[in-house]
Image (spheres, grey):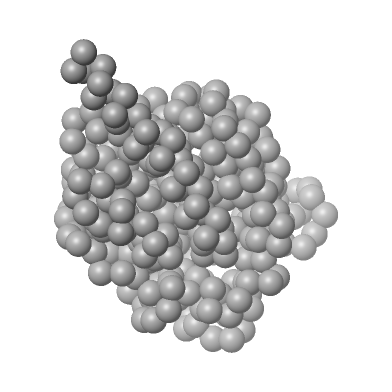
Amino acid sequence: MSRITSVASGPYAPPVPARTLTAVSVDGARLHVEVHGPEGAPPVVLSHGWTCSTAFWAAQIRELAADHRVIAYDQRGHGRSPASHACTTEALADDLEAVLAQTLARGEKALVVGHSMGGMTVMAASTRPRFREHAAAVLLCSTGSSRLVAESRVVPLRAGRVRTWITGRVLGSRAPLGPVTPVAKRILKYATMGAGSAPHMVEACARIVHACPRAVRHTWGAVLAALDLDPGVRELHAPTEIVHGASDRLTPPVHARALAAALPQCIGLTELPGVGHMTPIEAPELVTGRIRELVTTYVTDNTPVQQIKEGA
């Protein structure tokens, strides 16, 4: 299980949840789930990325919890969720369904938000009945569906077999990240964030990523290296918006454009100049604003209409 070493103050310090619970996936994997905000408020489900945790969403949770029910969970092996031998995209989809089943009433609609591997979780779950029952709309942040290693620009070489080989070794490394030092923060910033990212943003990201156990990082890195969720994208029929950093080296904007072209209901693609891979931390106001807009349009605004129809 990850060491919890998030920042303790500022906008990226994790808020205290209203309640915590454990969702159990189909294979018995136990998932740490946090619920923030009032019980009757419109729900937002947050799925974080590779090497991250619920702490990654601190800025969004802090702003949304006043009038939304924010549900955030740790992917298996991340944060407070124990590691599991089953590390596949199918397991990610199982886990998301388990969280939805544990936190939402039958037929209740929510906005589902996924960053990086969290977005891939959504793609993997696109055909699942429970996901389709609950997902009123989707927001994908900084993610892709295939060719992650081949398209990555983390290694500053010309595209080709050599860069792909080196990138695969870097992303799949078993080496420990060690303590959060100034050098470690510079490396993390180069690989995952925009050049203009403020020091407190880099600090928050570094503490979250360095808390992920190296075995978990390595295992899921191998899964992502072989990723092919293109069929799942074509089956993601919920209205879906995409937010992507134009300076993302880990999943460059080519992925966002491919998703926009393949999604059955892409309702918008926003590329953020100067922003890297960690969009919810690098552009917190914009991501939170998009969440609010999507909830208003696809979750809140649909409730009165449905009630009128049922009462007619």
In this rendering, is residue 291 above or below 16?
above
- In the depicted view, which residue is nearer to us: 122 or 241? 241
Query: The C terminus appears in which quarter of the rendering?
Result: top left
Residue 70 coordinates in the image, percent (x, y): 31, 53
Q: What is the number of callouts on the image?
A: 0
Q: Residue at x 77, y 63 (%)?
A: 156
- In the depicted view, which residue is nearer to us: 141 or 173? 141
Asked whether, in this view, residue 116 is left or right of residue 28, the answer is right
Q: Residue furthest top?
A: 312
Q: Quadrant of residue 83?
A: bottom left
Q: Quadrant of residue 169?
A: bottom right
Q: Is residue 277 visible?
A: yes
Q: Residue at x 65, y 29 (%)?
A: 261
Q: Residue at x 28, y 23 (%)?
A: 306
Residue 303 coordinates in the image, percent (x, y): 29, 31
Query: The N terminus appears in which quarter of the rendering?
Result: bottom left
Asked whether, in this view, residue 163 is left or right of residue 66, the answer is right
Q: Residue furthest right?
A: 158
In this rendering, is residue 106 above or below 69?
above
Q: Quadrant of residue 286?
A: bottom right
Residue 79 coordinates in the image, percent (x, y): 33, 64
- In the depicted view, which residue is nearer to us: 224 or 43? 43
Residue 60 coordinates in the image, percent (x, y): 42, 60
Q: Is residue 152 visible?
A: no
In this rendering, is residue 16 above or below 78?
below
Q: Residue at x 61, y 84 (%)?
A: 183
